[in-house]
Amino acid sequence: MPIGSANTLTDIEMKNRTITTFLPSLLALMLSVCSCSKTKEETKIASVTTSNTIQVAHPISSEEDTLDGRLILLIAENNTTEPRFQLRDDAKTCQAFGMDVEDWNANAPIAFDTNAFGYPISSFKDLPSGDFYVQVVFHKYETLTRSDGHVVKLPMDRGEGQQWNKAPGNFYSIPKKITIENGEFPKLNLALDQKIPAITPPKDSKYVKHIKIRSKLLSDFWGRDMYLGAHVLLPEGWDTHPDVKYPLAIMHGHFPSDFNGFRSTPPDPNLTPEYSERFKVDGYNIIVQQEAYDFYKAWTGPDFPRVLAVKIQHPTPYYDDSYAVNSSAQGPYGDAITYELIPYIEKQFRGIGEGWSRFVYGGSTGGWESLAVQVKYPKEYGMCFAACPDPIDFRAYCLVDIYNDKNAYFKEGKFRKTLVPGHRDYLGNVDATLRDMNYRELVLGSKGRSGQQWDIWEATYSPIDAEGYPKRIWNRMTGEIDKEVAAYWKENYDLAYILKRDWAKHGQDWKNKIHLYCGDMDNYYLNNAVYLAEEILAETTAPYYNGEVDYGDRAEHCWNGDQKNENHISRLRYHRMFITKYVNKVAAVAPENADLKSWRY
């Protein structure tokens, strides 16, 4: 995708060129590349050649005459798990290369472009010698004609939450063992003869109900039927109190396959303990099930607040959720959730249906969304609890100040450049740089189509380019920041800035509602933005914001304000924590004659 210009291709996606199939007589040749002028970086990588080819056979089980999508070649040291599950940001990652494919004819194999950009090694010629396992995955795209007139090719969610390596209908090959010698990649014939099966939707139970509605707002924008879903947890006594209406507890976050974290039975007795690499805890899977069962006992017990708890499904063609706001590239998800989905839930399950009675909470992506909907829809939501939120002040877009820094990848001085960290542990040990993380996404998808973190931020915050895809905040190859795009982000999605800018207008509607929590050693440096937002909130007057900001000492990502338990426990208790916090404070946001008693049986 162009950066800052509709006419000049300036980032590394140019190397992930669209490959178009030709007549069968030409199939043994490397396919020609549709390209425009190249940057110096592109010319350097495109100069790599190899005498061998990697032929990929068309999926024989495909129902489409032609296919569009992303072809991803993965190379791993081992096959303990398939290579498609080994791509990550740190040193334990496998290798991957990616290329776009358009109009892939059912009768034609194609040659994988050995000039394609790779991560973490950019070029085929630099691969180490040794024995490896190779796998190829084809991530299917759909052609969409949006209401703004743009025709775009994007991967649609198919029930998995926008995951390229798990998406039903995607094709992949069985891993094959190969040997690389002195930079020579062997000649290969790979068959996309495996297809990821459809996902069985969860079933309703006494307490958990599942809904799915067609959104008119989103369907109009995308030019096809688009749906929103939700998992609704009914309060104890919902069926025996038919006249009671309830507050709505909305947990924002990544795509939920079900209302996870709630189970009516004790942990499975034969469950094999699993070690959590992230938390360094043995038997964490057993802990997760025990916490879910404990929540069930609390939820159905005599003292827990009676509310409707909801997890929302709103995947987009760019990510596993929409970030719950309207955007140029994704459409009116904020309005669709707030004015279509939530009223539908309240009508179906007897919600009170007033702004004060709806409260939002979540962590990470869900933390940003919780604050965002409170900021964007000040009267429609009664309180927000945002834990470890994605950057809420773009002066600290992780470790980048998009307004004052010139480059996202480097801190530059007169005589040297230092790579900007992207991920750390609680002691500050860095295992990935910001450039690493962005390069991985470039392999998975051009034009913001990786389905990953940095791409969804652009899909949410950026204006669109001439092709209809999100404009880059920075050049994905060099890290050079586009200040025009940064200015657009500031006025529309920099939540801390918007709070300061609009406090005189909406301060009364934000009073008592904003609560922020973050570990001071957040793995993604998200605490830095919370510090800046706290300064803005602390200076508010007429009215004072009267909320809460709290930090966890040496706490990593997902810390949510629990000062008593370790992170691996507290992250499993969002519902118990924040529903109770809301109920204890609801009188401060409810109107004078609001019903605060009937649902507290």
Image (tube, rainbow, N blue to C red):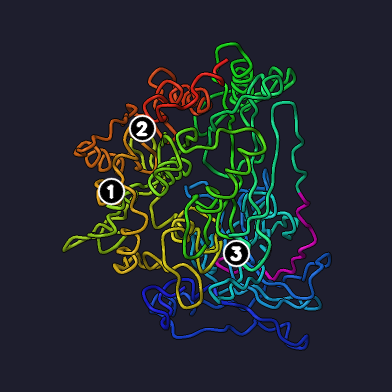
The quarter of the image holding the C terminus is top right
Which residue is located at x 43 percent, y 75 percent?
A: 2
240 left or right of 423? right
Residue at the outermost top position:
302
Residue 519 disc label: 2
Residue depth check, mark 2 versus mark 1: number of the one nearer the observer: 1
Q: Residue at x 34, y 43 (%)?
A: 525
Helix, strand or loop: magenta stretch: loop
| Residue 181, label in figure | 3
Q: Is residue 439 above or below residue 431?
A: below
Front in this rendered view, residue 209 or 477: 209
| Residue, disc 1 | 505
Tell me how far mark 3 sits from mark 2, CA to CA: 46 Å
Pick the residue in front: 267 or 218: 218
- On screen, residue 557 versus residue 197, left or right, reads left
Foreground residue among 554 and 244: 244
Q: Earlier in the sequence, mark 2 or mark 1?
A: 1
Q: In the image, what residue type sits under mark 1?
A: Lys
Q: CA distance from mark 1 to mark 3?
A: 67 Å
Q: Amino acid at mark 3?
A: Glu
Q: Confirm or deny contact between disc 2 and disc 1 (CB under 8 A).
A: no
The answer to whether residue 518 is visible is: no
Query: Which residue type carries mark 2?
Result: Gly
Left or right: where 486 falls relative to 263? left
Question: Does residue 528 appear anywhere in the picture?
Answer: yes
From the top left corner, tell me how far across and down residue 101 is, in percent.
Answer: 64, 74
Judged from this view, the residue extending furthest toward the left is 414
Query: Nearer the N terminus, badge 3 or badge 2?
Result: 3
Point 48% across, 80% down: residue: 47
Q: Which residues are magenta?
A: 181-198
